[in-house]
Image (tube, grey):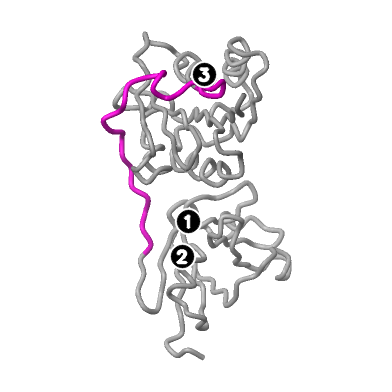
Amino acid sequence: MGILTFLSDFGTTDHYVAAVKAKILTINPAQTIVDISHHIEPYNIAHGYHVINAIYRDFPQGTVHLIGVDTHGTSSGKYQVARHHGHYFVCADNGLLSLLTDNEPEQLIDLPEQPDTSSPARDIMVPAAVALAQGATMAELGELATGMVQLLNRQLRLNDHSIIGHVVHVDHYGNLITDITRDSVDAIGHGRRFSIHFNREVVNKISTRYNQTNEGDCVALFNRQNVLTIGINKGHASELLGMYFDSPVEIRFARDPA
């Protein structure tokens, strides 16, 4: 029996999460359920994508990920299952799967249409997710999809002496997670001196821990996903810097190699 993870924008003050879990356990009382988060900002596909993309690889291949984010926001009216890097994702056809798979899932199916329901996560997505966790094949669950709603990840702007990226997420501590990867810095920088510019601040080094600066000072580091993160030691960087989703961040490299 496989693992089933659950990510949603349902919050924890109402009964919505419990209703989904009740349906899961009604189908299979022995099902293992791992909560990833239920505090995705309502309808925020970018937030949901960031969180699931940051964690799904840490689970064993074959894990089924139930994504209850913006479940009523599908313009196509479809609910889909995608296989990607050996994992299964059950989600509304709202663009999140296209971000997660770069529009190239290994396999994609449309779940059968169902009568109108106030809880598609519970009534449409859960039966498919539990069936997959119990060993069903995707072909048993629906028809091969002809496409999905597509959204585009913002691309880095690269040249010989700079990288311009953006904040893609603000975490619980106010840290600014960007789309600038360690690989892009290595590829452009070639070991050159650099400075990181954001708002009116400049940082000239990459740290390995937040406390490698004085309390209240800005710090830049690569997180576990190897993307550039900007924080303030013991401070909320987003609020203190006035930076939020899509705020620009630039790395400038010295033109000389020294």
Frontmost residue, 86 versus 154: 86
At label 3, the amino acid type is Ala
For the residues labelled 3 and 2, the Cα–Cα distance comes to 43 Å
User: Which class describes the residues within 10 Å of circle 3: few (<14), some (14-19), or many (20+)?
Assistant: many
Marks 3/2 in contact by CB < 8 Å: the verdict is no
Q: Look at the picture and state if 36 lies above or below 248.
A: above
Residue 226 position, x and y percent, is: 56, 60
Marks 1/2 in contact by CB < 8 Å: the verdict is yes
- Closer to the chain start, of discs 3 and 1, is 3
Q: Look at the picture and state if 204 lies above or below 9.
A: below
Q: Residue at position x 52%, y 83% from top?
A: 193
User: Which class describes the residues within 10 Å of circle 2: few (<14), some (14-19), or many (20+)?
Assistant: many
Q: Name the residue under label 1.
A: 167
Q: Mark 2 points at which residue?
A: 249
Marks 3/1 in contact by CB < 8 Å: the verdict is no
Q: Give, as a single range, the part of the protein colored magenta.
A: 129-156
* Nearer to us: label 3 or label 1: 3
Is residue 136 on the magenta stretch? yes
Is residue 147 on the magenta stretch? yes
- Closer to the chain start, of discs 1 and 2, is 1
Q: Quadrant of residue 219?
A: bottom right
* Secondary structure beneath label 2: strand
Residue 90 position, x and y percent, is: 46, 28
Q: Residue at position x 58%, y 11% from top?
A: 27
At label 2, the amino acid type is Val
At label 1, the amino acid type is Val
Q: Look at the picture and state if 173 lies above or below 28.
A: below
Q: Residue at position x 40%, y 67% from top?
A: 164
* Secondary structure beneath label 3: helix
Secondary structure mostly seen in the magenta stretch: loop
Q: Name the residue under label 3.
A: 131
